[in-house]
Every structure is written in structure tokens, then in C-alpha cells.
Amino acid sequence: MFAPVATVGGLTLASRALGLVRDLLIAAALGAGPLADAFFLALRLPNLFRALFAEGAFSAAFVPVFAARLEQEGPDAARAFGAAVASVLLIVLVPFTLLAEWLMPTVVAVLAPGFPETGERFQAALSLARITFPYLALITMTAFFAAVLNAIFRFAAAAAAPLLLNLSLIGALLLAAGWFETPAHALVWGVLVGGVAQLALVSVDCWRAGMPILPGRPRLTPELRKFGRLMVPGVIGSGVTQFNVVIGTMFASVVPGAVAWLNYAHHLVHLPIAVVGLAVRTALLPALARRLHGADAATGQAEQQQATAIALGLSVPAAVGLWAVAELAIEVLFERGSFTPADTVATAAALRAYAWGLPAMVLAQALVASFFARFDTSTPVKVAAAAMLVNVAFIVLLMPTLGHVGIALAQSVSACAQAGLLTVLVVRRGYARISPEAVGKGIRVVLAAAPLVALAYVADPLRAEFAAVGPFAGAATLAVLVTSGVAGFAVLALAFGVVRRGDVTAALRRFRSR
């Protein structure tokens, strides 16, 4: 399990690092003003439906069925199933995209009721969203080919694809912004170019892997019906999860700048979620599916426990570290150009609120794989529905006093509720067990991460020392705090027995051999 998680996690980390550069440029060009709110809303529209139909529901339903067919009937049968699914996707995507383009004013008005229809934010969002929405079709087909690659244990191309999107957005700002009405218009065209590049990468890698899939005339085969039965509750489940995002956007649109503040903060907190949580889920799902539908269920359960331990062992210190250096990190990374000190304070407050829920968000990614691998997409739907109600209730409760921070904190509370319910169900159904050793290791992870809180209290004195020496005091302080935090946690993790020296050596040996 370590090698595929390391492959996906490493490439995702590279993508997120490039995404951070992208966000720095966007913050400098757009700040947190009307254009920034409009751009992030326009980008959220295709990403919302992508998560709804593609990366969430689609992958959850497709990978287990494709992997089981590959394991039981061979590559030809798996390719035939994939071609049928690709055909259905195209039949749905093309008219859906055209309909959304026609109804875009209504869609923007529903998702951002705080944008007055005659105001600058609404008109800009409408113009930008009409350009970005076709990205949905591109990224959905990218998700299809990525799912095929993951099912045959080829993770690199799919994990590397987001690098191309980030490069396209960076290139749009640095090289082409002067050709367009605003930097935001350059960015949305960069989104489309990046979508084409991602689709080309994963489809070519499928061909190189001996799994070329071309859409043909769809036939309603038993496997396709089974896929549909699995995907429908998955769509509902993804819809419930994404409804949390929609609700947050609707409330945030009332406060000028809040959509942008929450997006900048969410992008930072999503770094460990993507690197750890999505990497664990991406690697675990096909492995579990093939083991459970082969003859090695015991190994599958062991891999589930190992994946959960990886998720918690990396996400807990990341959450504490982000909380401790939130304001300094936002200042160093974003505060330039159109991004003001007031934007720094507002974004850092949202980041701290998101950080509380980070371990739960990562843990949920690992736990849902247990259900998806067993063709159970309905249970995560019910859990997500309960978490959605928690999210809405806490937004209503917290936003009147905390403003946009209440939206972020409500999502953290909702994530904790979701992870808690999934844990209870995984244990009760025997998919995994919580041993005394696992509980002890979890406590030791928290004890090893807790001292990272001190980073928040040494930041100002350390910065004053660097300021006396020369410029870039903030960047130097952040670098020292991050480096010392990582090193300190590593030492404490070894001292408390979170990991053993032999485990680290063996893992590095497997990674080098791979």
C-alpha cells in the first residue's frame, strides 16, 4: 500500500505545490475583490458537477466493477465495458453542457444569491462561467480514463494530470493576460486549455498500457445496468457532499470578498487532503476491489487498516501546523498586489477553522473505500446526508456571529460527524477493527503533534530577529517554522513509537525499488 500511496501522493504534492504558485499569481492579480469572487464562482460550477458526476460518483461506481470484470473475465471484457460507459457519458455530457449554457443566468443567480443581478460580480460571473462550463465535459472524460488507469494500478499519469491544468493557468496569467479584457478572462480560457491537455495525457497513457478505449454504440448490458445502479446512489451521495459547498457559497456570496477568502483558505487546507486523503483512497479502492472479489479478503482488510493509519499519521500534524502558522503563511504567500492585509486576516481566520476538520476529511476518504469496494454506495450517501444537515445547522448557528469563519467551521464540524459515523459503521460491519494497539497509536500521534501549537507563539519573536538582519523576514520565519515543525514531529513520532525505524527503512527500500 505504501508504494501506490507514495506515487499518487508525491505527484499530487507536486501538483498542489504548482497550484500554490497558481494561487499566488491569482491573488496578486485579482485579490479578493469582485473579479476574484466572480472567477472562483465560475470555476466552482464545472468543478461542482465534475465532483458530482465524475470524480465522486463515477469513480466510486466504475473502479470496483471494472476491476472485478478485469479480474474475473480478462482485459477484453473490461475494455468492452469501458467503451459502453464512455459512450453513455458522452451522450449525457453534450446536451447537459448546452442546457447549462442556456440557463447560466439562472444557475449563477441560484448559486450566488448575494450577487445582485445588475452588479459587477454577477455580470462578471456570468461571462466567466459560460467560458468555463465546457471544462466539465473535458474533466469528466479525464476522470473516466484516470479511473481505468487506477483500476490497472497505473497511478502516475492520472495523478500528474492536474499539473497540466496548473501550468496552463500560470501560463495564462504570465503570458496571455494582456490579450484579454481582464486577467480573470485569461484564466478561464486557461482552464479550457488545461482540460484538453489533461484528457490527452490520460487517454494516451491508457493506449500505452494496452487498454485503448473508444466510445461506440452503447448497449444496455447487465454490467452497464449494474454500473448505473451503483452510480445513482453515488451521484446522490456526491450531491449531498457538494451541497455543503453550494450552501457555503450561497451564504458567502452575501459578504463581499468572502467567496475569495474561503477559496484561498480551502486551497491551502486541501493540500494535505489531496496529498494524503485522495492518494490513500485512489490507491486503496482498486486494491480492495480486486482482493475482495478475488481470494485475498484478509489482506484487503489489513490494507484498509494500514491506509487509515497513514491517513491519521500525516493529517493530524498537518492540521496542527496549519493552525499554528495560518496568518503568517497567508501573509507570506498571498499578501501582494491586490491582496491586502485585511484579506490576510480574513483568509487566515477561515484557514484555522478549516484546519480543525482536516483529519476527519482525510479519514473519510480512506473509510469510504471500504464501502465502494464492496459495491455499497448507499451507506456513504446516508452518512453524507446526515453530515450535510449538520453543516447547514451549524452555518445557520455560527454565521451571524462569526461571519465567513462560521461557514468554514461548520464544514469542519460536518466532516467530523461524517468520519465518526463512517468509523462506527466500518467497525460494526466487520470491514475493519479498532484494536487497542491502533487506539494507542492514535493517541501517540496526537501527543507527537500537540507541541506544534508552540509554533504560533514563537513566530513573532523569531520574525523580529530576522527583521533585524535583513529583508524577507516573513518568508524566512515561515521556512524555519515549517522545517522545525516537520523535524520536530518526526523526532517525536519515532520517540513515541508512532513509527519504528525499521518501518521507515523498509518503506524507503520499497519506494526506491519501485
Image (tube, rainbow, N blue to C red):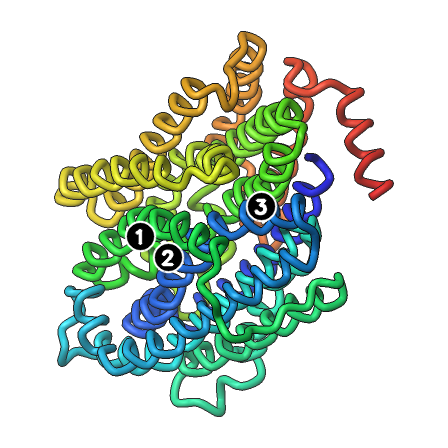
Element carrying mark 1? helix
Could you say whether the residue bearing mark 2 is in a helix, strand or loop? Answer: helix
Callout 3, which amino acid? Thr
Mark 3 Cα shell of 10 Å, populated few (<14), some (14-19), many (≥20): many
Q: Is residue 55 above or below residue 277?
A: below
* x 39%, y 84%: residue: 182
Q: Residue 17 in the image: state x and y as whole percent.
A: 60, 56
In the rendered structure, which disc, 3 or 1, sits on the residue that comes first in sequence? 1
Density class for disc 2 (Cα within 10 Å; few <14, some 14-19, many ≥20) is: many
Q: Nearer the viewer, residue 398 or 376?
A: 376
Q: Quadrant of residue 78?
A: bottom right
- Please give the residue where the numbered disc 1 appears in the rendered image: 239
Pointer 2 or 1: first along the chain: 2
Q: Is residue 225 above or below residue 297?
A: below
Residue under numbered circle 3: 282
Q: Residue at the spot x=52%, y=21% of the render?
A: 432
Position of residue 24 in the picture relative to residue 230 (left or right): right
Place of residue 15 in the rendered image (x, y in percent of width and height, measured from the top left): 61, 58
Q: Residue at x 44, y 43 (%)?
A: 326
Label 2, on which residue?
Answer: 52
Tag 2: residue type? Leu
Secondary structure of residue under mark 3: helix
Task: Please state the horizontal and vertical placement of residue 259, each as a whole percent of the image.
Answer: 29, 60
Are discs 2 and 1 less than 8 Å apart at CB?
A: yes
